[in-house]
Amino acid sequence: MAIRINEHYARGGFGLSFEFFPPKNEEGENRLDEAVEDLIQFNPSFITCTYGAGGSTRDKTLEIVKKIRDSRNLPVAAHLTCVGSTVDQLRSFLSEAQNLEIDYIVALRGDPPKGETEFKAVEGGLRYANELVALIRAEFPHFSMAVAGYPEVHVEAPSPQVDLENLKRKVDAGGDVVITQLFYNNADFLRFRDDCIKAGIEVPIVPGVLPTTGAAHLKRMVSNCGAKLPSDLYDRMEALGEDVEGQRKVGVEHCTQQLEELIAEGVPGVHFYVINRAQPTGDILRSISIPHVDQSDW
Ligand SMILES: Cc1cc2nc3c(=O)[nH]c(=O)nc-3n(C[C@H](O)[C@H](O)[C@H](O)COP(=O)(O)OP(=O)(O)OC[C@H]3O[C@@H](n4cnc5c(N)ncnc54)[C@H](O)[C@@H]3O)c2cc1C
């Protein structure tokens, strides 16, 4: 059995993780394979695959992580959300993940389905991620779990304090590691990390980074997850107009600098939202010096 994910970070080896999503067609499959192939050279600690809205990618998520685990001999994490699933359906996913010897679960509530503004649990389903974490800890105790954290505060939370209390609830229920939502201003992450420590959240807090490739891309990505638009970065990219390559360079430079600062601040690892395109992540990793990644620690 794999050791718990937090123990890996605790051993002091820098945790480098890459997040992919399940493609919808053959072209997407090929792009995913290429992205994994390109990024494997950076010696990731583990790889994760998202879980699509309403359980739409249920089988695909498991298929992808299993394929990567088997072909690359790397620890893998399957994301799982509560959206549209009864507890029995969640159990069935977890049993299958267990049979496939998936290492970790990223345990989430998920967003309300498209067109709906409020999350509603299905009958016989769960309302919050802490309930999913508790279910996993009680019935599938060998799974180590990551949970989501929000340096800019989750969009539905009435206050940063309440959001933090809810994060603590997830960690107390059994979350081993917090992986954060994307952010472009390190001050937000560092404040969040300090607040977590003050709130007694003692697990590793791993920043999630999404390398942006241009103004339109940046706007779309922050709006998808309710994060703040970093106006300085956006304006600098937008001012370059049709210069796509120039915009890409500005985005990569920003995220490279972001990462250099985060590493200097002693983060235990970094989680890249790769979105199945290897180049921006690869460009960043080629230009910075990542702390020692020792595969044997994972
Ligand atoms: C690392 C990472 C990976 C992700 N992967 C996916 C993915 O694969 N698929 C996908 O669809 N989405 C994914 N998401 C997005 C995520 O599903 C959304 O951000 C979602 O809106 C919240 O999920 P959560 O697990 O943080 O929910 P929760 O922790 O349940 O929080 C949701 C809201 O409810 C509040 N809350 C939490 N617990 C309680 C409680 N007990 N009582 C009252 N209020 C409470 C919180 O403050 C927050 O405002 C990911 C996000 C991150 C950061």
Image (cartoon, grey):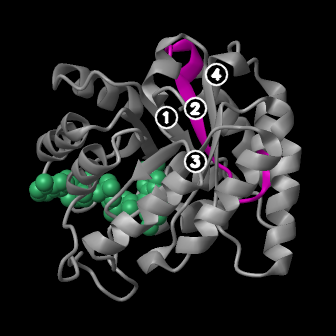
Q: Residues within 10 Å of mark 3 (few under 14, many from 20)?
A: some
CB at disc 2 and ligand 1 closer than 8 Å: no
Question: Which residue is rendered at x = 78% and y = 29% of the image?
Answer: 43
Whether label 1 touches label 2, CB < 8 Å: yes
Mark 1 crowd level (few <14, some 14–19, many ≥20, 10 Å Cα): many
Residue occupied by mark 4: 260
> Which dot, 3 or 2, sits closer to the camera?
3
Label 1 residue near ligand 1, CB within 8 Å: no
Pointer 4 and pointer 1: residues touching (CB < 8 Å)? no
Q: Which of the two discs, 4 and 3, sits closer to the camera?
A: 3
- Measure how far apart labels 4 and 3 are at the Cα level: 35 Å
Which residue is found at the position 71% from the left and 33% from the top?
Answer: 44
Query: Please, what is the three-letter code of the amino acid marked with disc 4?
Result: Glu
Q: Callout 3, which amino acid?
A: Glu
Give whichever of discs 3 and 1 has the lower sequence position.
Answer: 3
Q: Which mark is residue 270?
A: 2
| Quadrant hosting ligand 1 | bottom left
Given residues 164 and 83, the one toward you in this image is 83
Residue 296 image-quadrant placement: top right
Instruction: Please state the extent of the stretch shown in magenta in the rendering.
Output: 262-280
Work out how far the residue at label 3 is from the one at label 2, CA to CA, in angstroms: 24 Å
Please state the horizontal and vertical placement of residue 113, each as a whole percent of the image: 37, 82
Q: Which one is earlier in the sequence, the residue at label 3 or at label 2?
A: 3
**What is the C-alpha distance between the residues marked 3 and 1?**
26 Å
In the rendered structure, does residue 272 fall within the stretch colored magenta? yes
Disc 1 marks which amino acid?
Pro
- Say whether disc 4 or disc 1 marks the residue closer to the N-terminus: 1
| CA distance for labels 1 and 2 | 5 Å
Q: Do the CB atoms of the residues marked 4 and 2 lie less than 8 Å apart? A: no
Residue at disc 3, secondary structure:
loop
Q: What residue would you read off at disc 3?
A: 101
